[in-house]
Image (cartoon, rainbow, N blue to C red):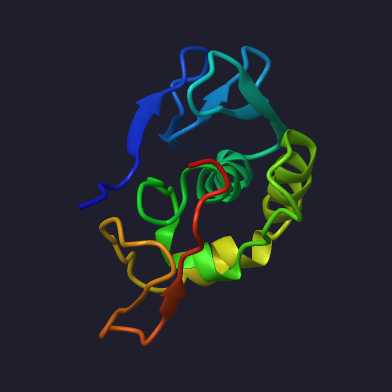
Amino acid sequence: MAEPPNYAEHESGGNKHPVYRGVRMRAWGKWVSEIREPKKKSRIWLGTFATPEMAARAHDVAALAIKGGDSAILNFPELSHLLPRPATCSPRDVRDAANKAALMDHLHHLVMSRPRIWCSRTTSESESESESDGITTTLIGRCWR
């Protein structure tokens, strides 16, 4: 079962912010996201973002593309069916789709307006439906096997 994000204190201001998978805060306040390529030491740089939620959505797109729905651990699993998919599995296409997802701020407000649904991992190309809100989530297969 996935767990909610932790809350960490930012060193300079004492503000609490959520800590999402694949997201970190730069010293000057910007949020960055990257993901490791499977079976490699290299990472795909997803970008620099204004908010941690933008960076977390970008990471979710990349995780679905790289690891697939059966093994990707997502920050916002309830949004997976709404996120853009990369045209190919190339780092450039993954980065482009991730940046499109980051700009989808309306999705974050949609999720935050109702109770959080914590989903466990599902098999690729399967559907799961929450009884509380009727959202159906379809997860894609992975690019790298």
Residue occupying image coordinates x 54% and y 13%: 41
Q: Looking at the picture, does residue 144 appear above or below residue 30?
A: below
Q: Residue furthest front?
A: 145
Question: Within the image, what quadrant is residue 5 found in?
Answer: top left
Residue occupying image coordinates x 60% and y 16%: 42
Residue occupying image coordinates x 43% and y 66%: 78
- 39 vs 102, left or right, is left
Q: 21 or 7: nearer the eye? A: 21
Point out residue 144 in the picture as x, y percentages from the top left corner.
54, 41
Question: Within the image, what quadrant is residue 109 found in?
Answer: bottom right
Point out residue 102 in the picture as x, y percentages from the top left corner.
68, 49
Q: Looking at the picture, does residue 110 appear above or below residue 20?
A: below
Q: 144 or 54: nearer the eye? A: 144
- 132 vs 31, left or right, is left
Q: Residue furthest left?
A: 1
- 137 vs 6, left or right, is right
Point out residue 13 in the picture as x, y percentages from the top left corner.
51, 19
Residue occupying image coordinates x 41% and y 47%: 72
- 56 vs 48, left or right, is left
Point out residue 26 in the picture as x, y percentages from the top left corner.
62, 17
| Total number of numbered discs in the rendering | 0
Q: 71 or 10: nearer the eye? A: 71
